[in-house]
Image: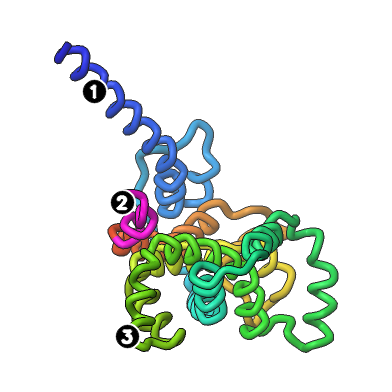
Amino acid sequence: MKAQIRLRNTLLTLVTYLIAAAFLFPLVWMFMAAFKTEAQAFATPPVFFFTPTLENFEKAMGSYFPALRNSLVAAVGSTVLAFILGLPAAFALAVYPTRRAQNVLTWMLSTKFMPAVGVIVPLFLIYRNLDLLDTLPGLILMYTTMNLPLVVWMMHSYMTEIPYAIYEAAKVDGATVAQEFFGIALPLSTPGMAATALLCLIFAWNEVFFALNLTSSDAAPLSVFIGEFKTSQGLFWAQLSAAATLVVLPVLIFGWVAQRQLVRGLSFGAVK
């Protein structure tokens, strides 16, 4: 019996490693291609042993930092604004729900179902009339509306897990609604806030469609910056891989550092 359990655990571990390797292989391949020449990147069969070069990174660095600044400002700004708008809404729907609270949550979630291509024309016209095209405020506003349903839904779930008896005890002591929000709901939802913030940052960082259609040069984020390496002369795989590595690296580092908070936040309330 113990031998069967040991064999099963070994097989599960092996399958887990294989799945992880399958997910990591594209990143590893991209990282390798970033240090190849264009000829080596296009070579068939693939070249696995080569002399690394930093030429691709030198070419990619030309417009990297302005795009990095735009991505950081847009991702962080939209996350902060989404939290400012979403946290009070999540608190109200979780602690003081009305008969139509679930309908409101469902409606907010339904806004994520519509294909982005179905709303880009009216959005483009609105942005053009408001002079928001190719501006950071316009990009922040777009990302905020994109992440707001996520903030409301996730924080509503976390705040619902807080025992209502804590709020009742606070009311007996004379606490106001604002004190319940800032003194109880927010401190007890810190793990959930960390996980939600990390997901909002990742979604805003990786967003491509709206960035391509609503920005061009001044507010272009890293997702638009990558597209610069597809020109009329062809697709420069090595330079594109170097640019993609530079784009992915900040998210990988941040996710690695914050992984404990992310796991804790995503599992918050799962075990009572």
SS type, badge 1: helix
Q: Is residue 271 magenta?
A: yes
Q: Which residues are magenta?
A: 261-272
Give the residue at mark 1.
Answer: 10
Give the residue at mark 3.
Answer: 173
Residue 179 position within the rendered picture, expressed as x and y whole percent measured from the top left = 39, 86
The residue drawn where x is 57% and y is 68% is 97
Residue type beneath disc 1: Thr
- Camera-side mark, 3 or 1: 3
Q: Is residue 193 above or below residue 127?
A: above
**Crowd band around label 1 with a 10 angstrom C-alpha radius: few (<14), some (14–19), many (20+):** few
- Camera-side mark, 1 or 2: 2
Residue type beneath disc 3: Asp
Using the image as rendered, state which of residue 42 and residue 167 is in the foreground.
167
Q: Earlier in the sequence, mark 3 or mark 1?
A: 1
Q: Which mark is residue 272?
A: 2
The residue drawn where x is 55% and y is 42% is 42
Q: Earlier in the sequence, mark 1 or mark 2?
A: 1
Q: How is the image coloured?
A: rainbow
SS type, badge 2: loop
- Camera-side mark, 2 or 3: 3
Real-space Cα separation, disc 3 to disc 1, in angstroms: 56 Å
SS type, badge 3: loop
Residue 219 position within the rendered picture, expressed as x and y whole percent measured from the top left = 63, 80
